[in-house]
Image (cartoon, helix red, strand yellow):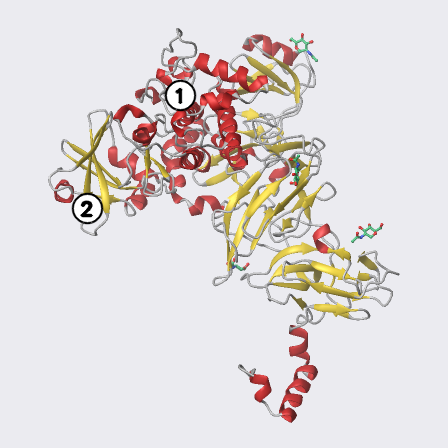
Amino acid sequence: MKNPSPLTNIPIPLFLLLLLFFLLSPSASRAERSSLSRGSSLSVEDVSDILVSPSKSFASGFYNVGSNAYAFSIWFSSSANKTVAWTANREHPVNGHGSQISFRKDGGMVLTDTDGRVVWSTNTSSTQADRVQLLDTGNLVMKDPSGKILWQSFDSPTDTLLPTQPITKSTQVVSSAAPGSLSSGYYSLFFDNDNVLRLIYDGPEISSVYWPNPDDDVFQNGRTKYNSSRYAVLDGMGKFVSSDQLAFSASDRGSGILRRLTLDYDGNLRLYSLDESKGTWSVTWEALPQICQIHGLCGRNGICSYMQSKVVCSCPSHYEMSDQSDWRKGCKPKFQMNCNTNSFLELPGTDFWGNDLNTSESTSLEACKETCEEDCSCEGIVYTSGKCYSKGTLFNGRAPPDTPGITYLRMPASMSTSGSSAPQTHELICNAATYASSRGKVRWVYFYRFISAFGAIEILFVVSGWWFIISRRERKPTSLEEGCREISRQFSQFTYKELKKATRKFMDEIGRGGSGVVYKGVLDDKRVVAVKKLGDAIQGELGAELSLIGRIYHKNLVRIWGFCSEGPHDLLVTEYVANGSLDKHIFDEHGTASVLGWSERFKIAVGVAQGLAYLHHECLEWVIHCDVKPENILLDGEFEPKIADFGLAKLSKRGGVGSDISRIRGTRGYMAPEWTTNLPITAKVDVYSYGVVLLEMVKGSRVSNLKVDKEEEFEGTPKSFVRMLKEKLESGDESWVEEIVDSRLNGQFNCKQAENMVEIVVSCLEEDRNKRPTMDSVVHMLLLS
Ligand SMILES: *[C@@H]1O[C@H](CO)[C@@H](O)[C@H](O)[C@H]1NC(C)=O
Ligand SMILES: *[C@@H]1O[C@H](CO)[C@@H](O)[C@H](O)[C@H]1NC(C)=O
Ligand SMILES: *[C@@H]1O[C@H](CO)[C@@H](O)[C@H](O)[C@H]1NC(C)=O
Ligand SMILES: *[C@@H]1O[C@H](CO)[C@@H](O)[C@H](O)[C@H]1NC(C)=O
């Protein structure tokens, strides 16, 4: 025997003694118990009477949901506070005395209340059920002697899906009603009749789907209707894949991490990872970074908006909260509405989603108001550039900055002209990091973890969005400066002398572009940096603007370390990216010999899309790049792309009044058509430019040099080329792919990816920006191939 086990060295009598000790000690035997056999039970009165999974990650037993109220649940045992993953009796808690979960002799497992009443049952009586086990996956299973599963908790999810627990055509995930509560709320995740996985608000008065984006069609959302298997599951690596082609991954993708996908009480679907050393959860993906897009939040007539880092609900003027303790009940008018109330109160930048009585296009505002006046049930209209929506009931109101529509609420003439009094505003959310659980009296508290994780957004908010909201809400600004000071501590201001030294008197020029000349340098702390001398194009408060952006951090964005603004010198200090810009690698212009391979191109396409999606969506759509082009995409040693110069793009003013976004210009050949019209500039300009860059990566040449037929030359716009691509895509014949893709690759490319990329190009280059996908859905679409 090579390796005698320690036990074999123990004398036999002592071994028996130890065995006896383990068998008799109640605490030891109970704590280790991972299964129940027929005829045994768990009692509510003994807190240690629980099942623990073999790896001790999960426990199952009675969970205290309120004073003297208990639920039979499964929870994560290593989170600081018990985090419940599944509950048998969500709506019917049982008494703290005499309640039991018993695995009866007849094979059924039942939960009984103090009076013996059966509250819940597995419905497995008179089966061969032999044991109930809590597995390491967090699944509680009932098996027969042959190991066949007769019942499992994974088949009836509550508000959480665990890795390997699928959602299917017959199951749905339902949020809890409030933090700390286990009972069902109004939000569900489910497979819809068209096979698409959706989130719906299903409240007492209305039901409406809010994810994926209900304004876009299934394809634009990166989904498909054509797979009716209706099956989606999160795997052990943190990747979620659905039969409708939805796919996403945890940002900490990898094995060995405990995760959960929870439909939170605020209607957002979030993927969490557990830090087992601290017992805390962090969000690694979420369905809706912009909370106001969730329906039902502020109730009837209520309006959702962001104020600083908070999501708030407010009532329009002459309306008041229906129930001071519950925003979901919305607002009620302080006047009597009747058929003769024919005046309108204007709410700029406000939209109410859904519940349209009548929709018409190219209508004048007057005609639109008339349509509403003629219909007694019309409570108001939403009017956006010629489109008229008359509304039966006003739900899902939202007014985040950049909302294009104007809402006109119908009200008596005496009121609508009396000027707008400051509307009533109440905070919906509490402190950022709180996963507040206040049992007993439930407060309607929101948490907005995302913002705490990326404090920058908060500040972006303060500067760019806040004034906007403030001016609209007629409130007094408070601590704007405090926000900036806070930030500047994180972000370095360099002296000119320091940078002169770092760059050895600006010796090593590594680039030159519209916005300035770039030099390589090494800081005192050995950090290799790129120092950009900004030209005259930059005006205004360099420091103020950049310090906001300095804290934005994403692997596909060039990190900004600091700046220097001294007299005539404006310099920007950023991360140094080794491999230069994309144009040098895909175009022949510079006479470089090596050609970028297909897999690198694909990786770059995905990375750039992710970087832009981060700027557009996760930063609450504050940051629009405005100048996406190969010169602004830098590549590191591994050909991971990093988007540069986003710091110089103006922070989006979201199309608000007095927007001076016109100051920035894109680059010819990459500019969306709306730059030349008077339309407000939105994130969709970047989507367009990205489309051009993507096409250039596939083709390996500048779009502005492309020719469709031998004669026809582009005038810097890819319009006719796109038309041709569209026709080819529709033709169904796939041989064209070969013709489009860069011939220097000698056919070494992934055909499916190429086709998919061309499809994305076509949708990104839509003239009508509303038809272009968001960068988020571009990322999804790319990852599908
Ligand atoms: C656990 O709950 C308590 C009280 O509700 C709270 O103060 C604490 O922060 C929570 N801990 C974690 C890690 O969430
Ligand atoms: C057991 O059957 C009852 C009555 O049909 C049903 O309401 C309950 O949901 C079933 N329990 C389970 C765990 O499926
Ligand atoms: C449909 O979805 C299932 C589950 O995700 C998958 O296994 C199957 O391959 C899909 N079928 C098609 C035709 O894509
Ligand atoms: C909608 O409005 C248009 C124009 O005002 C009108 O012709 C049409 O009948 C209306 N439709 C409905 C369903 O009310």
Q: Residue at x 62, y 50 (%)?
A: 442
Q: Residue at x 66, y 59 (%)?
A: 74
Query: What residue type is disc 1 on?
Result: Val
- The answer for how far apart the CA atoms under marks 1 and 2 are is 43 Å
578 vs 484, nearest the viewer: 578
Q: Residue furthest front?
A: 746
* Residue 230 percent location from the top left of the image: 69, 39
What label sits on residue 522 in the rendered view?
Answer: 2
Left or right: 316 in relation to 230? left
Position of residue 284 relative to residue 95, above or below, is: above
Q: Quadrant of residue 658?
A: top left
559 vs 238, nearest the viewer: 238
What label sits on residue 76 in the rendered view?
Answer: none
* Residue 614 percent location from the top left of the image: 43, 37
Q: Residue furthest top?
A: 711
* Residue 625 percent location from the top left of the image: 37, 29
Give the secondary structure at mark 2: strand
1 vs 2, front mark: 2
Residue at mark 1? 657
Q: Residue at x 30, y 34 (%)?
A: 545
Query: What residue type is disc 2 on?
Result: Val
Q: Earlier in the sequence, mark 1 or mark 2?
A: 2
Position of residue 10 relative to residue 263, above or below, is: below
Q: Are marks 1 and 2 in contact (CB under 8 Å)?
A: no
674 vs 357, nearest the viewer: 674
Give the secondary structure at mark 1: loop
Q: Residues within 10 Å of mark 2 (few under 14, many from 20)?
A: some
